[in-house]
Image (cartoon, rainbow, N blue to C red):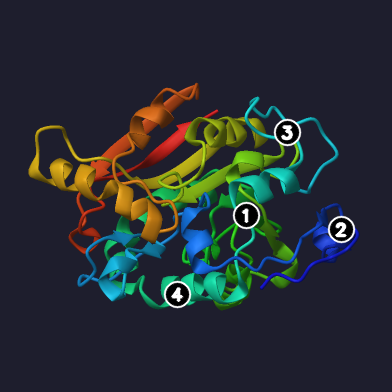
Amino acid sequence: MFVGISSPTQITSTPFFSNIKIKLNLNNSHQSIQNLAKSPSSSCTGGGSNNNICLCGRRPFLATISTALIPLHQSNASDSFSDDPIAVLNRVHPPRPDWYEEFYAVAMDASMKSYEDEIAGYKSELFANLTTGKAAKILEIGIGTGPNLKYYSNLASGASVVGVDPNRKMEKYAQAAAQASGLPPTKFQFIHAVAEALPVSDASMDAVVGTLVLCSVKDVNKTLQEVKRVLKPGGIYIFVEHVAAEDGTFLKVIQRALDPLQQVVADGCHLTRETGDSISAAGFSSTDIKKVFLSSASLINPHAYGIAYK
């Protein structure tokens, strides 16, 4: 379970991120799995195999297996959220027992290969915009175990990546993925936070990346406003998200029927969100969205992918 810290503790990052300070104030959590299932969940991060009923990216559908800087700034948070990123984290993604967080991290790390192999071509196309645009500061929301970090290997010299995820157990996997990609340790920082309250300053990022994240954030619109807030003018938002099937299709019928169960067993993942429409309506200066069906993604089809420009 999470180790409680009786008083706030300041943790200063590596030299490159010396201006990033994270304040932790966690409480012991002795939730049972029953209470956990009732509590709100936040992140969908992950993939699965062709044998899964639903491969919710980095949060596999579990029914098939037994069921930079935290700044001192005023956030543009909506009335439903606190301005404090730590308070929002605890509200949106209450602390889970260690074993529960570790279970999802291990499942995510072990079950993504077929999905990542199939999506690789689309991701390569999107991530090429980071090198052609010479992005120097990149923020990835819902970074999970870091399957996207290999696409950052050709970044311009001096570029840095900040990864945000509500599951603390993802960090060791993300750090390992960063090392395997050749990203220097001083150029990668993992921060425990949620996308609804990004712990970085306004207009501080050249690019924001999110893949299979908006399916399970607590507030899609708030998350998109946070993405816009942290992007510099002219910055880009790269996304890959599964979205609801077309109305009138058999797949949409199945998605609607399984959506409530999916949210319980897949850590808050929604099968029927119109995420592409939400991105288009978020107020970016322009958006380029395409759709694709992936054979390895089972019920979480189609996928909307593209770039939005601030």
Q: Amino acid at mark 3?
A: Asp
What's the distance in space between the residues labelled 1 and 2, CA to CA?
Answer: 28 Å
What separation in Å lies between label 2 and label 3 (alpha carbons)?
A: 18 Å
- Quadrant in the picture for residue 183: bottom right
Residue 18, disc: 2
In the picture, measured across the screen, residue 123 lies left or right of residue 51, that is right
Of label 4 and label 2, which has the lower sequence position?
A: 2
Residue that badge 1 annotates: 94
Quadrant location of the N terminus in the rendered image: bottom right
User: Which amino acid type is shown beneath numbered disc 2?
Assistant: Ser
State the quadrant of the C terminus: top right
Give the mark toward the camera: 1 or 3.
1
The amino acid pointed to by label 1 is Pro
Q: Label 4's element?
A: helix
Q: Nearer the viewer, mark 4 or mark 2?
A: 4
* Whole-percent x, y for residue 247 in the image: 15, 32
Can residue 136 be seen here?
no
Q: Residues within 10 Å of mark 3 (few under 14, many from 20)?
A: many
Question: Which badge, 1 or 2, comes first in the chain's sequence?
Answer: 2
Q: Earlier in the sequence, mark 4 or mark 1?
A: 1
Residues packed near mark 2 inside 10 Å, few (<14), some (14 to 19) or many (20 plus)? few
Q: Amino acid at mark 4?
A: Asp
The Cα–Cα distance between marks 4 and 2, rounded to whole angstroms, is: 29 Å
Under circle 2, the secondary element is: loop
Q: How far across and down, in percent of the image, does residue 215 sit?
A: 40, 46
* Cα–Cα span, label 4 and label 3: 32 Å
- The residue indicated by pointer 3 is 202
The answer to whether residue 225 of the structure is visible from this angle is yes
